[in-house]
Amino acid sequence: MSLFSRTARERDPRLPPGQYDAGDTFPVLTAEVVPRIDPSQWSFRIDGLVATTRTWTWDDVHRLPASVYEGDIHCVTTWSKLGTSFGGVSLDTLLAEAGPLPTATHVVAWSSTGYTTNLPLEHVTGGKAWVVWEHEGKPLTTPHGGPVRLLVPHLYFWKSVKWVGGLRLLDHDEPGFWETRGYHELGDPWTEQRYDGD
Ligand SMILES: Nc1nc2c(c(=O)[nH]1)N[C@H]1C(S)=C(S)[C@@H](COP(=O)(O)O)O[C@H]1N2
Ligand SMILES: [Mo]
């Protein structure tokens, strides 16, 4: 490659401000002790402000219509992974079975480890969020949240709870693990909502 083409190379338009392309690497960021969760012991629960509290087992979620996300993910520590993919089921499918009540405005997503994060309900509906067990066609590994993690790729990746166990629907916002430690309530990478007050 000539010096000219290197210096003139444009920034990949898929990269939000302040982010770099991590290429083929997929860094691991974990605050807690990594849990070992056997798929046969895993379940996903939606409760709180719903018409019907629902719980799905590993077999149950595999019977639902499969959904794949192909695109990018962005960690607040400035790495982005471009053109990756995750497979699982759309949260829309799961929420439709539980039936959010009209009073529900926010969700808390949680892991059995105690890790939590808060999200406005409208940010996990309309094809924006998934519960996933595959990464680039292979089973999601334990360090990356396997057997099953949340995926909310339009927000910074701390919202994508690893080893996810469920969602609780609320009529108010309830800051989670990182949000009570100075991270932004929402976390939009395109407007660099990294920390509280950004
Ligand atoms: N349970 C749990 N989920 C979590 C985290 C965590 O520490 N524990 N870290 C978050 C953060 S800050 C990021 S960037 C991503 C990292 O996912 P990865 O380790 O698969 O890259 O998971 C998010 N989900
Ligand atoms: Mo992160």
Image: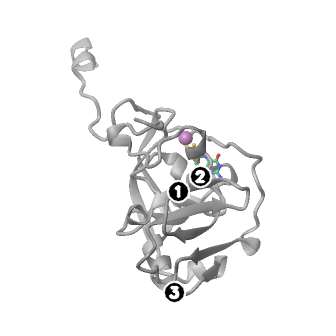
Question: Residue 176's mark?
Answer: 2
Check disc 3 and give the amino acid type: Ala
Decide which of 103, 50 is in the foreground and name it.
103
Check disc 2 and give the amino acid type: Gly
Residue at horizontal 51 percent and vertical 33 percent from the top: 77
| Residue topped by disc 3 | 51
Q: Position of residue 194 (x, y in %)?
A: 45, 37
Tell me whether circle 3 and circle 2 mark residues in contact (CB < 8 Å): no
- Give the CA separation, mark 3 to mark 2: 24 Å
| Residue topped by disc 1 | 118
Relative to 11, does residue 39 appear above or below in the rendering?
below
Tell me whether circle 1 and circle 2 mark residues in contact (CB < 8 Å): yes
Decide which of 8, 184 is in the foreground and name it.
184
- Give the CA separation, mark 1 to mark 3: 21 Å
Evaluate whether residue 135 shows in this view. Answer: no
Label 1 residue SS: strand
Residue 146 occupies quadrant: bottom right
Q: Residues within 10 Å of mark 1 (few under 14, many from 20)?
A: many
Q: Position of residue 3 (x, y in %)?
A: 26, 12
Residue 120 occupies quadrant: bottom left
Q: Which quarter of the image is occupied by the N terminus?
A: top left
Q: Position of residue 161 (x, y in %)?
A: 59, 55
Residue 13 occupies quadrant: top left
Check disc 1 and give the amino acid type: Asn
Residue at horizontal 53 percent and vertical 77 percent from the top: 49
Q: Position of residue 47 (x, y in %)?
A: 59, 76
User: Is residue 128 toward the left or the right of residue 26 in the image?
Assistant: left
Mark 2 or mark 1, which is nearer the start of the sequence? 1
Label 2 residue SS: loop
